[in-house]
Amino acid sequence: MAKWMAKELGKPIEECGGIQGLKKLYSEHTGGVPKTFVTCTDGNHGRGLAWAGKELGQKVVVYMPKGSAQARVDHCLNHGAECSVTDMNYDATVEFAGRKAKEEGWVYLQDTTAPDYFEIPGWIMEGYTLMAHEAVGQVLSLDSALPTHIILQHGVGSMAAAVLSYMTERYRDEGLNPPVTVILEPSNAACAFESAKKGDGSSVLVEGDLDSMIAGLCCGQVSEIAWPLIWKHVDGAFTKVSDGLAGNGMRLLKQEGVESGECGGAAVGLLQRLMASKCAKAAELRKELDLSVESRVLIINTEGATDPANYEKQLKLQDVPYSVDDFEFVVRRIRKHLKRSFDEMSDPQAQ
């Protein structure tokens, strides 16, 4: 939102005086008339946009797909946005928000690409790289060792592509192969998984209700600017997981003092599942990924308990027993990584 406003003013965002300075300059530019920004969200994106609108003095309209939790609606409303739940799935709601923007003269602010709509999704992806930069800095501050593996959640792919791009460049600067990457999706909304199965770099549209507890990842169409980056740089596997594994991960994180919603829980649940010692399927993927007890796996917890009712429900449940169908995978190894043990990647003095 801030970059769009600065562009309208014809000024670099760095020269606008921060949030308050930009708010004042834009108000002077428009005679005090706020602009309306519109988006579709499963939760976090709309909440962030609502907060930005409040801080920058702009109007925000948020649409959510059917089945969205009331708590996620309330998060947007509490920041002063208009927010409503449609009777459509995520991808249809994205298209609806885009149509409303054109009809009403609003600014469409979405990380999903569309024909002639790439600049704003690109800005959003640039923002995601900050998470990777901060995460790497925190990891290195522990013992100077970079992760050997990374698990990235995939909705439309913007976060995954941005973080993977950052990691690829950062590791190459360090003279290392990029980390082995695992892309994660819900079983009922696995557009990257289905695209990877084709094996030719093209993308697949997944249709239907896209129903999953892992609501933040329930997207049926990959971003046109994210998918080429993901397909080019993922050296590892594309996976899809059951809701049960996400619940297992949420409970495991809670035991370690970390509050996590379904998306972050899914990544931890998948890793826990892959380390199951008596499962031939898990052992097969571990071998393909060079994943062992010596591996260092980076996971980004992308949400807290944004659906408090479901969070409390999941904490009260017992862990779901593993089954042969609770995860599926497509391996994509661009190169066979050299075995990089913990010792090889660590500062000898830290060891």
Image (cartoon, rainbow, N blue to C red):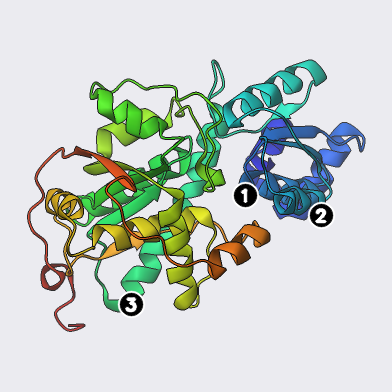
Alpha-carbon neighbours of circle 3 within 10 Å: few (<14), some, or many (≥20)? few
Asked if the residue under mark 1 is in contact with the one under mark 3, i.e. CB atoms within 8 Å, the reply is: no
Residue under circle 1?
44
Alpha-carbon neighbours of circle 2 within 10 Å: few (<14), some, or many (≥20)? few
**Left or right of 228 in this view: 243:** right
Asked if the residue under mark 2 is in contact with the one under mark 3, i.e. CB atoms within 8 Å, the reply is: no
Q: How far apart are the alpha carbons under marks 3 and 2?
A: 37 Å
Residue appearing at x 62%, y 45% in the figure: 45
From the viewer's side, name the closer residue of 119 and 15: 119
| Quadrant of residue 111 within the rendered picture | top right
x and y percent of residue 274 in the render? 25, 57
x and y percent of residue 11 in the render? 67, 37
Residue 142: mark: 3
Amino acid at dot 3 = Leu
**Left or right of 327 in this view: 110:** right
Residue under circle 2?
78
Residue 58 in view: yes
